[in-house]
Image (cartoon, rainbow, N blue to C red):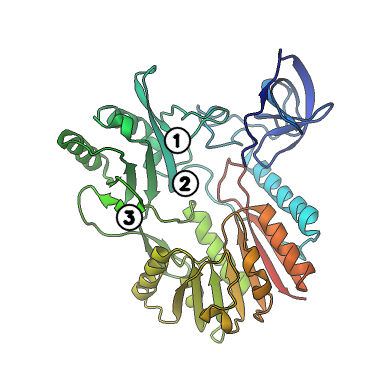
Amino acid sequence: MSRGRGAAAPAPVEETGLCAALTSEGEGVVHGGKTVFVAGALPGEEIRFRRRRRHRQHDEGELLEVLTPAADRVVPRCPHFGVCGGCALQHLSGAAQLAAKAAELRDTLARIAKVAPGRWLEPLAGPAWGYRRRARLGVKFVIKKGAVVVGFRERAAPYIAQLTQCEVLKAPAGTLIGPLSELVMQLSIREQLPQIEVAVADNATALVLRVLAEPTADDLARLRAFESRHGLRLYLQPRGIDSVAALSGAAEPLHYRLAGPDVTLEFLPTDFIQVNAEVNARLVDRALELLAPEGSSRVLDLFCGLGNFTLPLARHAGEVVGVEGDAGLIARARRNAERNALGNASFHVADLAVPVEAQPWARGRYSHVLLDPPRTGARAVLPWLAGVGAARVLYISCHPGSLARDVGVLVHEHGMKLEAAGVVDMFPHTAHVESVALLTPA
């Protein structure tokens, strides 16, 4: 969450201090007087810094020197680290990153939900580099630089970082930053192309170019040549999401495969999919292990999307019902079920941000429930969820605060028990914390 720009600090003075912890955004926390957040500082380090922005509860500081490095400090792999806002923790070892995320989940559950799990799950992790298969890159023609910049937002400024490559984007996307900058620079619409979405499937790499003006014939020729030279699929998006169209016509749908349950899911280049393919596969396997559905099980998958969990669950359960608010995703989930010959999976469109008791699918009983809500959580469905009679509820979360809030409601207001919880490192080198929580009737 943005903290706002704050007021510029007058006459910056150099200070020294001890970093005590990390914020949820990966900044170092320095106490002593008014608390200051310092990007680049790690717990246990004595640092030299100066305050740059003042806020009511804290200040923002600039790291000038690490006087006593932490044992877990490492040299960042990416030359753009510190400027680019895509990563926040490349200077912290992978093991320490996992430990910090596990500590945040533990502390958040204790502080907000006032509960601890019966057991802590081993963290789920995967490749730390070249893992990110979905991303949204900003594009900007900068007159003063005489160049087009392509990349993520800068960490400390509202500009696009000028990258030459990206170490976390999945191949070949990570090495295409420089070539994309050169390509857009050659286009007549370079000032009307603000964004490129990346989707790396098992069978192709797709780039969706947001175009605010119609490309000329010469532009199209350059784009097709780039597409052919790099073995890509380019798409143009002149208006809303429904306007996305392949530059070179129809092709085999994008897809990814989950080997464990032997399921293949097709998707559009702008659809939500989990960004880390390897960790997602392990997360699906863990969901199957924790829920343990059987032939007699009736399973509900809330916020089901394309069926990433629904279809693997259908390989083991008697019946699975998927619910999602996006009608397009539900249509593609149904097609995915058909392609995988899973006749025991059905899907419904419903707004899960409001009470659902009146929905036809909500009137039955379910033995197992999986929910994977957005950052805002699943507060509206909790009273109903607590009464469906499920023996196991698996909550997959992308925000520890909303998870803790919802777990607290289920435990303290509806008599459930937090059996197990653990972190999922879907986004290495960022402060983003994903997690799973298994709840059962008390």
Q: Which residue is mark 2?
A: 132
Q: Secondary structure at mark 2?
A: loop
Q: Nearer the observer, disc 3 or disc 2?
A: 3
Which kind of residue does numbered mark 3 sit on? Asp
* Mark earlier in primary sequence (2, 1): 2
Q: Quadrant of the N terminus?
A: top right
Q: Which mark is residue 166?
A: 1
Direction from residue 198 to residue 18 in the image, left or right:
right
Q: Give how far apart the Cα atoms at labels 3 and 1 are.
A: 29 Å
Q: Is residue 245 visible?
A: yes
Question: Which image quadrant for residue 184?
Answer: top left
Q: Which residue is mark 3?
A: 242
Q: Spot the residue most to the bottom.
A: 296
Which kind of residue does numbered mark 2 sit on? Arg
Q: Secondary structure at mark 1?
A: loop
Which kind of residue does numbered mark 1 sit on? Cys
Q: Residue at x 71, y 52 (%)?
A: 105
Q: Looking at the image, do the residues carrying marks 3 and 2 touch, with CB atoms under 8 Å apart?
A: no
Q: Looking at the image, do the residues carrying marks 2 and 1 touch, with CB atoms under 8 Å apart?
A: yes
Across and down, in percent, residue 149 comes to 39, 28
Looking at the image, residue 438 lies above or below residue 86: below
